Amino acid sequence: MDQLMTFEECYRMTDMPAGKRKVLLAALRLFAANGVSGTSTAQIARAAATSQATIFKYYKTKQDLVNAVLAPVFNMLGPDYQADFTREITNFSPRRHLDEIIAAIIHRRYELMERNHDAIIILVGELMGNRRIIRQARRLFIRGARLFGPRLANLLQKFPEYNRNISVYEVMRIMMSQLLGYFMVQHRLVPGISRNTEQDLDMIAHEIYRAITN
């Protein structure tokens, strides 16, 4: 599972001109740090040690660049991470308790989010108004729900405390909202405050467990 690529590794391993790769890496860092609206193509060009002409050689608009930065979410990393989640829920030992399984899922998903924190920050921002990204994210979510939804449902059904009135899709929505909310608080609202992430994630997992059980 630890062989899953990060965004930066994906850019580095994809066959493309070196100048284009530098632009993507610079844009990834600057968009995450300053926001898309707060980042100019001139800043990206300086960070990539190239010219704005080179940027516009590859991307007609800044929005095209944003879409290219996030492309691995939808065509490589997203599907790979969904497959990883499918393997994870399939391989859980039947001896484990439901609260332990939820905690393992939460910790693993957050670990992957942290490994791609710049891209996640940009993605969340673009989901506020970028229709193309919204459509792609919706398709990815539906694909994932079809891929691992039935397996997650089968796993949950093995535990008598699981509340059958809560669908597997509601469980997925609860997990996603809790993880994204916590991630954005840590990286945007109070990034300078020291924290015990492991303890926080255990608390989140416990709250999810309480929410989906009788």
Image (cartoon, rainbow, N blue to C red):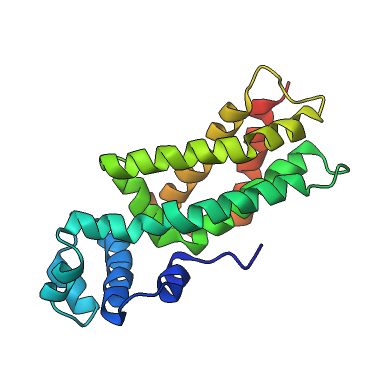
Question: What residue is shown at x 65% (from left), y 41% (from top)?
Answer: 205
Residue 149 locus on image (x, y percent)? 63, 35
Q: Nearer the viewer, residue 114 or 59?
A: 59
* Residue furthest top as drawn: 165
Question: What residue is shown at x 36% (from left), y 50% (from top)?
Answer: 123
Q: Nearer the viewer, residue 147 or 186?
A: 147
Q: Quadrant of residue 33?
A: bottom left
Q: Is residue 199 visible in this depiction of the protein?
A: no
Q: Is residue 121 visible in this depiction of the protein?
A: yes
Rendered-image quadrant of the N terminus: bottom right
Residue 109 locus on image (x, y percent)? 58, 51
Q: How many marks?
A: 0
Residue 75 appears left or right of 148: left
115 shown above or below 167: below
Rendered-image quadrant of the C terminus: top right
108 shown above or below 102: below
Q: Nearer the viewer, residue 166 or 75?
A: 75
Q: Quadrant of residue 212?
A: top right
Question: What residue is shown at x 38% (from left), y 43% (from top)?
Answer: 136
Question: What residue is shown at x 13% (from left), y 78% (from top)?
Answer: 51
Residue 183 locus on image (x, y percent)? 47, 50
Residue 67 appears left or right of 137: left
Residue 69 locus on image (x, y percent)? 32, 61
* Residue furthest front as drawn: 15
Q: Quadrant of residue 25?
A: bottom left
